[in-house]
Amino acid sequence: YKDTVLSYHSDGYPTGEKVEMNLTDKHLSWARGELVVVTGIPGSGKSTWLDYMYARLSFIKKWKFGIFSPENIAPLKITRLSEQILGKAMGLMTKAELNFAIEQINNHFYFYNTEEMEDYSIESILSLAKNMVRRYGIDCLCLDPFNYIESKRSKDESSNESIGNLLRELKRFAVKNNVNVTLVAHPRKMEKNSGSYSVPRLYDISGSHHFFNVPDVGIAVHRNYVDGENDPVEVHIQK
């Protein structure tokens, strides 16, 4: 490890990639070898925000992504990514603009065919991800959401232990394959306080305190739902 340590001395500690948004870059970077957990109540904008981050990373840093998203079939995900890339709704795009966005997505995003997959086990998902690393050179694996992933659990293993083991397996995969692994996980049912929801914490994610302990980075995407669509989306970096 001598050369690596000497590089820290001459070049500084390694930092993640930035998306060239001043406020975001001040608090967040995207690094290979790290496990990121993103939470937020349903409809808060978690997936949309991630799509935007990924679109920027694909343009600015040429990152490539493997996407496991069983809640959104690939054509729908491609449509939403196109809107993020172009900054306009589908109905406002010209055909040439849409073709440009699709070409960008084709070169940087690789989707699990979740409609045809029969095995949603973590072993199967990571086996396919390993092939994406070797064949396409993906920089990031996104699993959205956690509750679709099936984990083998022994009869003597608690839910908390099972989730901890799964998260550690994702972290090992990130380090061994030098990719960023981002996991989206819903919190438990949140109660309203004075008409709005509190910002969920990583400890609020259903099933295990390991959602805080294991990842390198923890993010909550939040919307208060006081004024409907006019409520701003907040991004809270919690770890």
Image (cartoon, grey):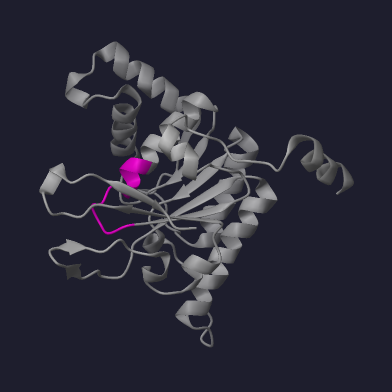
| Magenta: main secondary structure | loop
Give the total number of marks visible in the rendering: 0
Q: Does the magenta stretch include residue 196?
A: no
**Residue found 47% across the figure and 47% down from its top:** 142
Residue 29 placement, left or right of 137: left
Vertical placement of residue 97 versus 221, above or below: above
Which residue does the image show at 54% across and 68% down from the upper left?
A: 213
* Image height of 184 relative to 73, above or below: below
Asked whether, in this view, residue 187 is left or right of residue 227, the answer is right
Compared to residue 21, the image places residue 201 above or below, namely: below
Return the x and y of residue 236 as percentages of the image width and height. 38, 52
Q: Is residue 96 left or right of residue 122?
A: left
Q: Position of residue 145 (x, y in %)?
A: 38, 56
Quadrant of the rendered image containing residue 77: top left
Residue at the right extreme of this rendering: 2
Location of residue 50 (image quadrant): top left
Taking the image as drawn, is residue 104 in sight?
A: yes
Q: Decide: is 117 above or below 14.
A: below
Residue sitting at the far bottom: 156
Name which residue lies at 52% across and 61% down: 122
Residue drawn where x is 28% and y is 25% of the image: 87
Q: Residue 229 lies in what quarter of the image? A: top left
Residue 70: x percent and y percent? 35, 51
- The front one of 39 and 184 is 39
Q: Is 43 inside the magenta-drawn segment?
A: yes
Q: Is residue 151 visible?
A: no
Could you say where residue 171 lies in the image, as x and y percent from the top left?
60, 58
- The magenta region covers 40-49
Residue nearer the viewer, 161 or 111: 161
